[in-house]
Amino acid sequence: MSDIRIEKVRKQFGNLEILKSVDLEIKDKEFVVLLGPSGCGKSTLLRIIAGLETESSGTIRIGDRVINSLPPKSRRIAMVFQNYAVFPHMTVFENIAFGLRMRKDSEEHIQRKVKETAELMHIENRLTHYSGQLSGGQRQRVSVARALAMEPEVLLMDEPLSNLDALLRLEMRAELKTVLSASNTTTIYVTHDQVEAMSLADRIAVMNGGRIEQYDVPTEIYHNPATEFVGSFIGNPPMNFIAPKAGWNISKNQVNKLGVRPEDFDVRFEPQEGFIKTNVLIKELLGSHQQLTTKADGEMIRINIPSDLQVPNGSDLFIRPADDKVRFYDQAGHIM
Ligand SMILES: Nc1ncnc2c1ncn2[C@@H]1O[C@H](COP(=O)(O)OP(=O)(O)OP(=O)(O)O)[C@@H](O)[C@H]1O
Ligand SMILES: [Mg+2]
């Protein structure tokens, strides 16, 4: 069993508290993504799990072992970094074999594992090439193959695709997902790319300022953001957070903000009971739909509408959130 339990992990660098009591449990074979803005502590948390950094306090368990005091090599964890860490003067074969040789596995085992993981990553016909001659995408495959060859209980990946161009990222993302679900490895994957997170994760932990704001499956994170931060960080454009409008007759007390996704408005061209007036400032045609930036009572509201509706700039629209799609947030920005 390779379930991971992180309990009350804190990390200080000098006087700065970088991780503020993080709790996280990851099930055996689960694919969990740590998602959050730059500097929120994602890499620090990952490095603590790997044993490359020491926590200030807290406990980390894998299965029933407390691993806090174990050195990295005894944790049965493999890590893939953003910058690949592939050795250019070694062949692809030797790069993949690197960890196995360090561990003094048998030559027969090494031959078999390298071949197996190279096939998995579609680089089996590059084994004799020097890694310096490879493209970025191929190098990334080598570093994933090297990690998988170790048959780790847990695979940690820190922005492994961020050095690749957009098309290759997309391709590698799909491949990684297939390969990792076939390999049955428990994976923690760090990114600040929400699309990557949504498409890869079984569950997403959204981090902000050294805390986990929400930990749930992607659809819940999207449709029921636990905080205004999560709603604003996920979704492009983000969720609207709007002061309650009298015209919408929404009967709930103590509401500070309504959270409404841009695609969740009913839109009319004429005034109607229960709808409020909003003025179209900017119209962007995005192919599949149009994105409108509008203003109602001095507040910006972003609305997505079908691409075939004719809406001139400066025109008025009448809107109301679809009843089952409104979320309510309190003064502290928490969902009610
Ligand atoms: N060794 C260190 N000494 C001092 N401060 C550090 C150290 N490592 C990280 N930090 C600080 O901790 C905070 C979190 O860093 P971390 O690298 O974990 O962020 P991140 O979420 O991975 O960001 P990014 O998306 O940019 O990679 C940052 O403010 C960083 O400056
Ligand atoms: Mg980082």
Image (cartoon, rainbow, N blue to C red):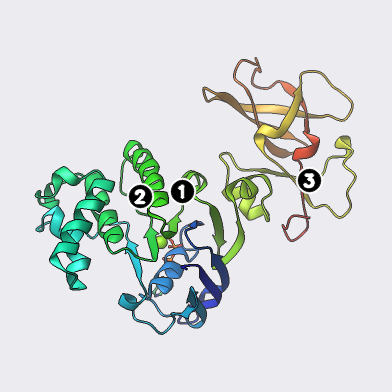
| Residue depicted at x 72% and y 57% | 333
- Name the residue type under label 3: Ala
- Name the residue type under label 1: Asp
Please tell me which residue lies in front, 86 or 43: 86
The circle drawn on residue 193 is 1
Mark 1 and mark 2 in contact (Cβ < 8 Å)?
yes
Q: Secondary structure at mark 2?
A: loop
Task: Give the residue at mark 2.
Answer: 162
Please tell me which residue lies in front, 260 or 93: 93
Task: Give the residue at mark 3.
Answer: 243
Q: Is residue 323 found left or right of 63 in the rendered image? A: right
Residue 297 position, x and y percent, is 78, 37
Can residue 87 be seen at all in this image of the molecule? no
| Residue depicted at x 52% and y 25% | 286
The circle drawn on residue 112 is none
Residue furthest to the front in view is: 108
